[in-house]
Amino acid sequence: MRKFPLNKAFTLIEPGPVVLVTTHDGEKSKIMTISWTMVVDLTPRFAITTGPWNYSYAALGKTGECVIAIPAVDLLDTAVGIWTG
């Protein structure tokens, strides 16, 4: 992994690659694949799709924190195969 300036992170997100979102609620970590993201503004603020039907939503609501990772092309099959329950 290489470091990237946070204020330039939106340039990697548009036009919307598959991303992995990792959350942790203090007890359990979870990772989910998301195929829809949106840059909200030029600060490091993104919109993602999730909802109350999955664990990551609850963890994100509890902590307000997550990690958004953009997998390399060679990880596409692995990223798509991640269970999001």
Image (spheres, rainbow, N blue to C red):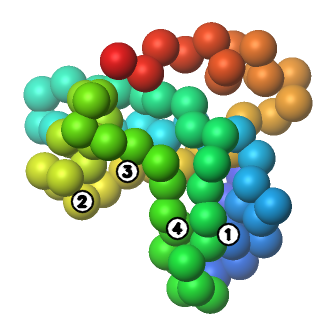
Query: Left or right: where does residue 51 sit relative to residue 7?
Result: left
Up the image or down, 84 lies above or below 34; here it is above
Q: Earlier in the sequence, mark 4 or mark 2?
A: 4
CB-based contact (under 8 Å), mark 4 and mark 3: no
CB-based contact (under 8 Å), mark 2 and mark 1: no
Q: Residue at x 13, y 50 (%)?
A: 62
Badge 1 marks a residue whose secondary structure is loop
The image quadrant of residue 18 is top right
Query: Left or right: where does residue 55 sit relative to residue 79?
Result: left
Residue count near mark 1 (Cα–Cα under 10 Å), binned few <14, some 14–19, many ≥20? some
Residue wearing tag 3 = 66
Q: Earlier in the sequence, mark 1 or mark 3?
A: 1
The CA span between labels 2 and 1 is 19 Å
Residue wearing tag 4 = 46
Label 2 amino acid?
A: Gly
Up the image or down, 6 lies above or below 28; here it is below
Which one is closest to the eye, mark 4 or mark 3?
A: 4
Residue 24 shows in the view = no
Label 3 amino acid?
A: Cys
User: Residue pushed farthest bottom?
Assistant: 42
Residue wearing tag 1 = 9
Can you give x and y, in whole percent of width and height, for residue 3 in the image? 67, 59
Up the image or down, 44 lies above or below 31; here it is below
Label 4 amino acid?
A: Phe
The CA span between labels 1 and 4 is 10 Å
Residue count near mark 4 (Cα–Cα under 10 Å), binned few <14, some 14–19, many ≥20? some
Which one is closest to the eye, mark 1 or mark 4?
A: 4
Label 1 amino acid?
A: Ala
Residue nearer the viewer, 29 or 39:
39
Residue wearing tag 2 = 64
